[in-house]
Amino acid sequence: MKIADYLIPTPQKIEEYGIEFDFHGFNTSAPDTLGEVGKTALEKLAGLGFGDYKLELILGQVPDEGYILKLTEKSGSIVANGDSGFFYGVITLMKLLEVTKGKRLPVCEIEDYPDFKDRGLMLENRYGSDFMTLDDCKRAVDYLAQMKYNQLTVGVYGCWCIQYDMRLSEFLYLPIKSHPELQTPRDIRYYSVNKGEFVEKENVLPTMFSEDYFSDLIKYAKKNNIVIKPLFNSLGHNTLIPRLHPELSAKDEEGKPTGHGYCVSNEAVYEFMFSIYDEIINRYLKPNGLDAIEIGLDEVYAWLGEDLNNIYGKFDPYCKCEKCRGMGRQELMLQYIVRVCKYLVSKGIKSIYIYHDMLFEQFDCVNGELAERFKREGIFDNVVLDWWYYTKEEDVFQKREINSLFRSIIKPFTGYYHWVIPMEYNDNIRALARLARKHKFEGIESYSSFEYCFDRPFAWQAQVSWNAKKTESYDEFLNSYAASRFPDDARGAKEALSLMGEVTVNDTEVNLMNSLEYYWYTYVAENEEYPRVFHASVYKKITAEYDKYTEYFKKVIQKTGRAIEFFTSYGIENAPDDPCAVWYAVALHYNTYAENYLAMLALNDNYNNGEVCVNLAIGILGEMLCRQEKLMSVIENTRIEANSYVYLRNHSITRQLYVDLLDYFEKAKAKGERPLFKIDDFSYCLSERYNKLR
């Protein structure tokens, strides 16, 4: 084995000697001063079995979180300056054993340490994460720890517009005892192929909220050298609180509450927010020794679909009361930031993360003047700007130069929309890693949800945030990724994964499939009825550029077909964290929809020109339904269950279209009638079930 081919992230320095020896278990010795992270490392070693191979954990002069791992045929050692270094040395050792299925180890010396202090991922409070169990989250922690992540931001409050079931997309994950009225139930509605029935549940609260397991998650993460911080958004992505408490909301010119935003001149706003922060700090942070929180403050705009009584209205989140109207929007936001940050500092919070976009892009005030103001207010040392951008390199940060005047982290996009067709933003990760290195930021912490379909971008970010020298070595990373995930056939895996990289790329000019997803039609759009027309709109879009889309679908089928051949031959274990099963499901999603779009287009042409009879049309529709249900069954077997609900709902509406078309054709055939078939208007066949899903 070549060690570097199997380790992600790649260690800083590796000396290997081409010698391997049989392994029969460890006889480990360690310092008496180990804390809980060090003890977790010992537990992992114990799980590998007791034997005659002597392994010594030694305290020494090594960079923070770094380690020196030495393995000879007779004995080995891990040198570190504390628990985290021992932990990561053990993680590396376990990976070396994993490659040989626990049977052999290489003679080697590995010297390793991270280039960025903070290496993290954000678990956004959105679809899927609201129903993740504590065990789901623990498995996510284990997975991230294997790639040497040490930060996990958990979104605990955030709101978006109306989408499914005529409900605002509001998410609150922590029960606020002082405000029990703050709750965010959601409906679950999808067809389960494996159960052969629709699953429908109404008013289900987030699992973290109902079980109140956040503190347990914090404790578990700490044992695995991962620090958790909560994100409780405020002025932006905030409809629940001002909707339920309009007295706190922004006011119009006549002093009437709008039910949106906050009046930042209203003392009651701060009393309310501080009571929430107090609960979070006193119940979750202080008992676990944590001193960081993210307060968001991104995208403070007026959006469509944020008011159930006027879905086409846009409501300004900035107050226009007598006190507020004398201040510009920049000052209104800064007044709120200063007040909240000063309070959090007084409560012992040392790091307060704030998104960059409003201060940098909207107000252009990330400058020396703002730094001086924060210093005067006593919050400069505590504020950390969270610089996020999710586009290709040439467009990041609106093509403007960012700066390092403040403590900062950078936030690339590892994968968020797990409920639509999976895509990869690997160029974005590399671009933002370059900037983080250039400006010497504290770390790289991506915007994300958690789902194993984003395994490659998760691994790529782990690579560039631990070993920054590898930022320009994406092909080298692909070699390691293929070898680490498919050790029995790394070469075949790289070929299949390269094809999938071409298919899943986040480029709207190349990846045409994403814009056809049902999810994008759940948003309110100006001048369109709501709920919006979905399938007919999609087929109008496709037929308007018929040649472009049909050629694209054929290429997708060809590339994913080759990848599917590899994944099925390699062996699929049907588990959410099995790389082969995960990649097979991603390939099958693209392949199935491409096949069915082409089949529908051909049926539309050939049925309406008389070349296809009713019986043959029924057969073709049945084949489309079978392909769709096969995909949905695979999804149920390979996705985290909580994440599968909304993903399957989006597939369920397409399945229902095929069911409705078949039912319509069968009934017309029974009457001796020739069915109508139009793909720019399916209103002639759509069922009540379809419209409920819509």
Image (tube, rainbow, N blue to C red):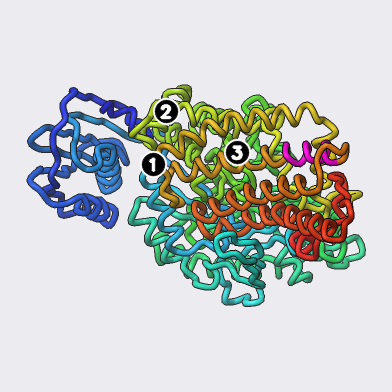
Residue 51 position in % (x across, y down): 10, 48
- Which residue is drawn at the image coordinates 65% and 62% (left, top)? 190
Residue 469 in which image quadrant: top left
Q: Nearer the viewer, residue 333 or 395?
A: 395
Residue 101 position in % (x across, y down): 25, 41
Say above or below: 302 vs 488.
below
Q: Mark yes or no: residue 86 visible.
A: yes
Camera-near label (1 vs 3) is: 3
**Which amino acid, by three-letter code, is at mark 1?**
Met
**Which amino acid, by three-letter code, is at mark 3?**
Met
Say above or below: 169 vs 427.
below
The image's mark for residue 423 is 3
The first of marks 1 and 3 along the sequence is 1
Residue behind mark 2: 492
Side of 268 relative to 112 (left or right):
right
Q: CA distance from mark 2 to mark 1?
A: 23 Å
Camera-near label (2 vs 1) is: 2
Q: Mark yes or no: residue 340 visible.
A: no
Image quarter in which the N terminus is found: top left
Side of 556 relative to 689 (left or right):
left
- Magenta span dominant secondary structure: helix
Q: Secondary structure at mark 3?
A: loop
Classed neighbour count for the residue bearing mark 3: other residues with Cα under 10 Å, few (<14), some (14–19), many (≥20): many
Highlighted range, magenta: 598-607
Residue 533 position in % (x across, y down): 83, 52
Q: Nearer the viewer, residue 658 or 336?
A: 658
The image's mark for residue 147 is 1
